[in-house]
Amino acid sequence: MTQTDRDPARLSLEERASLTSGRDTWHTEAVRDVPAITLADGPHGVRRQTRGSGDALGLTDSVPATCFPPAVALGSSWDPGLARRVGEALAREAAALGADVLLGPGVNIKRSPLCGRNFEYFSEDPHVSGVMGAALVAGIQSRGIGACVKHFAVNNQETDRMRISADVDERTLREIYLPAFEHIVREASPYLVMCSYNKINGVYASENRWLLTEVLREQWGFDGVVVSDWGAVNDRVAALAAGLDLEMPPTRTDREIVDAVRAGRLDEDAVTRAADRVAALADRVGRAERADGWDVDAHHELAREAARGSIVLLKNDGVLPLAAGRRVAVVGELARTPRYQGHGSSHVVPTRLDNAWDALRAETGGTFAAGYRLDGEPDEALAAEAVAAAAAADVAVVFLGLPDQAESEGFDRTSIDLPAVQTALLRRVAAACPEVAVVLANGGVVSVAEWQDAAGAVLEGWLPGQAGGSAIADLLLGVHSPSGRLTETIPNRLADVPSHLHFPGADGHVAYGEGRYVGYRHYDTLGRDVAYPFGHGLSYTRFAYSGLDVRETGTNAWTVEATVTNTGERAAHEVVQLYVAFDEEIPTRPRHELRGFAKVGTAPGESVRVRFDLTARDIARWSPSLGDWRVDPGAFTVEVGASSRDIRLRAELSTPGDGRTAGLDRMSTLGEWLDHPVGSRVLKSRLRRADGLASAGSPALLALARGIPLAKFGTFGIGLTGDVVDELVAAVRAES
């Protein structure tokens, strides 16, 4: 379809209005030369509704497709190349199943471990979320299928998600909750962005012009379609005016839009722009590569590889890998009945499903005991059978985790504890067997502090997708070395979480009172103990770091290089992490923040040189007064290490800043005037007594004076009258 074919001027107002709303749950409207677009849920598998299904959303009746590891797992791989390959496979399946757009990835920040949808999100850190999300988008769109990044923005809880107002200051938005979306838009050019249900500072995301037009389009350059989350539109006219292009599914008649234009309540250009974007999307996906099917076995093996690279070895006292010839007892119903994905709109009917018990039995010939019921009901007979099996074994592998009903889209958890029947069983097994390894299955972080002393090894399996059972066996048996790393901190207890006192809000509002101090930014700034830090993960070998070299390549630009050496006896991967640190006695920003990472594979004894590029944005902060990013002059440190708490190499650097300063006005304080490079000079040149005001008197008096707005000095008889202050403001603005 050519641009002329899509010219909105060829369409009537009624036809243009119809393009801005879906035809039904999964299709847009077809108008003249603009074909309908078919959308399908993602993000870790194609959920394509069965034809003729009575289930409008297809939650319980969809066509089988590969269930890849959800983002909670895939993010923990820290492997953008792997994410891109998964995206390419998703695109093949979407094309084969007749879908034009895949609704994913989800890149919202894990503000609280209680969020019921955390299994669909990558990290507590925006850099990891942005890089991994961009890789998945690039993979999906490499075949012409549209990716839809969601949920824009600040969708960090399920409680009251369709009405809640997320009340967040702009600096926190810009530094924590928006950067992942920004990175994906700038680097991967997604075809669509999906707005969230919630309000942001009192305005629904679907009606938020600042978010959808000023930030997304004007500042970031997004040129695709903004689609609503399903049912997120409350006022279709206001949404179109704000920059929402497509309402899904249709809830109101198109007559509402036409009438609003003719009554002068809606600019017709807004309808034209939205219709043109939908038509352009139809043109884009119309060129997608199509196929009749896909290699089911190959995609299953890719799912296995992705799960294997995502599982995190939290602890290991030498129990793992399982040595050949040892008697192994596999305990836990989750080994036989795996939890491999979350529930809700992303639920995929898998093409096949591996379980860990079958995979382990084939290699170890061990014994199995269910140990507990998944509904949480105590069952002494099952527990006793498990203890007996453990007592007869050399090592017990105990599978623990959250049952299906514990976490899902639509509600938030109230606890991060494992079911009591499971932890009680673990204690009994540990008393009966000399060596115990635990394998976890959970979509959100669970507490380990109360029970991990009973285990010599803990493997965080997350929700690993349809091939997760085989992937877990690969790692337990030592066929591969674990290489996943935590993308979220595991706290000792729920009360330690920075958002704990604010989550999930009440009376229609949730205050983001912890500000920018989310996850490791909070724990590391305050030096708080955690169970396992952000970035942590063990392998079956050891790594040494050396040779840090930092070189300035331009103004506020550097390259950082370091060498990583495998000093053990097994091939393995290491995730090298780069942080930028600010050592402040009184913190004004997080102590350090992730700015780069690289996953490298090494043979025993092999050394690999890793390089990162640092830019001004990496050391900038958002300045609300400037309405832009700002680099302050001063010292900072680059840190290279294996986690946020395992820093191996450091180098101190300094920056001259970017020369940008905030504006001054009548209500700027004396201290702000004196600290401003232009304001200080203008003030001192215009007012002879300003030097004395800034230096005379006791330190307490000076501190008091520095906090007073300049306009308030008019009553103190020192010459700073209202007219003089106005002249000073004008002079500063003229020079700046």
Image (cartoon, rainbow, N blue to C red):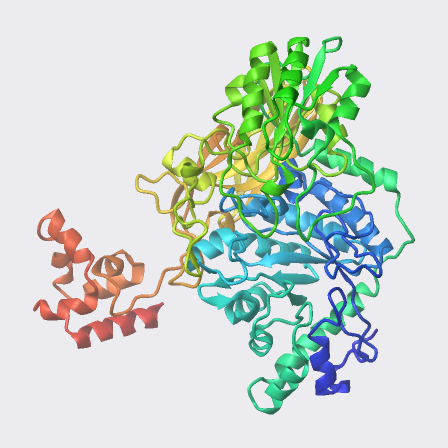
Report the residue that reaches farthest toward the right. 292
Number of callouts in the render?
Answer: 0
324 to 438, vertically: above or below: above
Residue 623 appears at what percent x and percent y?
Answer: 41, 58
Q: Report the front residue among 714 and 614.
A: 714
Report the residue that reaches farthest toward the bottom. 263
In the visual, does 529 lie left or right of 701? right
Please name the residue shown 61% across and 32% down the image: 401
Could you say which quadrant of the image residue 713 lies in? bottom left
Please name the residue shown 58% across and 79% down the image: 237
Q: Is residue 568 visible?
A: no
Residue 456 appears at what percent x and percent y?
Answer: 57, 16
77 to 372, vertically: above or below: below
66 to 505, vertically: above or below: above
Q: Is residue 60 visible?
A: yes
Residue 195 appears at what percent x and percent y?
Answer: 60, 63
Quadrant for the N terminus, please: bottom right
Q: Report the front residue among 165 and 655.
A: 165
Q: Report the front residue among 620 and 85.
A: 85
Could you say which quadrant of the image residue 517 lies in? top left
Q: Report the front residue among 15 and 642.
A: 15
Please name the residue shown 74% across and 62% down the image: 56
In the visual, does 71 lie left or right of 283? left
Quadrant for the C terminus, please: bottom left
Residue 566 appears at what percent x and percent y?
Answer: 64, 21
Please name the residue shown 58% across and 30% down the image: 562
